[in-house]
Amino acid sequence: MLTSVEIEGQIARLEFVKSHTAKCRRENGIKRYDVLKRKTCACPYYANGVLDQAVGFKRTPTGEITLAKAQDVIRKRIQTGNPKASLAPNAVTIEAATKDYLATVVSKDRTDSTSKKYTTLMDQLVAFCKNKGYASIKSFDQDAMQAFYDAWADPKAAYKEDTKWTKMSNGTRKRSLKTMSLFFERCMRRKWITEDPTLIIEVTAESRKKTREQVKYLTREQMKKVVDALDENYHQMSDYNKTRLKALMLLMRWTGLRISDAVKVKIEDIKGDVLLVVTKKTKAPVQLPIPVEALEMIQKLAPYDGGYLFWNRRSEKSSITTVEHNFGTAISKLFEKAGVKENVRHASHRFRNTFAVHLLTKGVPLETVSLMLTHQNIQTTENYYADYSTGYMDRAEKMIRNVWQLGEGQTL
Ligand SMILES: [Zn+2]
């Protein structure tokens, strides 16, 4: 046990400086550890110095914004021997703050996946803070947030030891950052903190752009080979099943539907030679003409219960995912037989690519193809097919020429 004189001696050897937030640095034109003259700010104090010869120099966040309280925190830490101790009850611990937040967003049973995501993220925050020595929610500043954010992408981050947490994907990091921001917003409403530390995080999205080589589509010859491979190789398959599989492939090729949507097409979705459906993934409507070749094949089919063309719900174990899987596997095998070999795992997606690439190279605008593919935004379409969007420029040039070719007496 240290005497109070010894404790005060230790505190006297420390330097207490504010660690200014980015906002404060910007507003006051100062550096991170500068002293603010004649003004006060709500930035937290750090204790700098040597507490223990063995530990050496340390810069420790106190989570307090007044000097007196910052010293109290350190005093308490020396007294208790707990390097993470904070002042109770004013300083809310990170663990308490996460519990408070989770109580508002997580449903009681904790079984749904959204609740689980919130809980996991908050568990990670608590583990990270324990590992780094952040005790109070106030002490969790922008630098802490940046370090936490960076650690999400690092499967070997120290706080993840002995856990099953791995590397977060880009999409998950984005979502998690939003959740963190909501969490801090609540802490601000509770007056525990004054600033959302996620504001400094710059999200650097990796380029998702696909090159020409990565977009696998079928040439006219390959398409024919795939369809022919069915008659040449599957002697045991009934004629009706062959027709059905051909109709499905042609439908996907000429409408760009995902296999999950294609297997659910009903006879009533086709009016004349027009397909009218709402896609599952983005809930967007699609209206497309179907070429004669595909339409004739589809018209040979006898609809199942409910008007479904490909989904026989009467047969056993015929859930829609099973149907999708079975057709997907059949198409992959067919691709192999047809000599279209590379990456046949997502074979059915090639019909979709073929649909898009064909239209784009013929000058159909990217915007239109994006709508037909029911992409959530045009950025997705661009990421996949921008390299093929060349025909559009020729078409645009022609359109502009037409506008500029004025008749006599006309002006622009
Ligand atoms: Zn400041």
Image (spheres, rainbow, N blue to C red):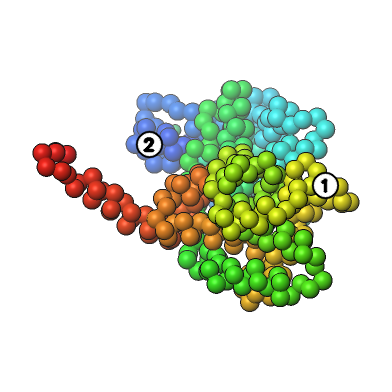
Disc 2 crowd rating (10 Å Cα; few below 14, some 14-19, many 20+) is few
Residue 111 showing in the rendered view: yes
| Picture layout, residue 409 above or below residue 330 | above
Give the quadrant of the C terminus.
top left
Q: Which of marks 2 and 1 is in front?
A: 1
Along the viewing direction, whichever of 225 and 82 lies nearer the viewer: 225
Q: In this view, does 68 lie to the left or right of 333?
A: left
Q: Mark 2 points at which residue?
A: 26
| Picture layout, residue 128 above or below residue 114 | below
Residue 49 is labelled as none
Disc 2, ligand 1: is the CB inside 8 Å? no
| Picture layout, residue 181 above or below residue 386 | above
Q: How far apart are marks 2 and 1 (CA)?
A: 64 Å
Q: Which amino acid does label 1 sit on?
A: Arg
Q: Residue at x 86, y 47 (%)?
A: 314
Quadrant of the image occupied by residue 77: top right
Q: Mark 1 points at which residue?
A: 313
**Label 2 or label 1, whichever comes before in sequence order:** 2
- Helix, strand or loop at label 1? It is loop
Q: Residue at x 46, y 37 (%)?
A: 21
- Residue 390: x and y, percent? 38, 59
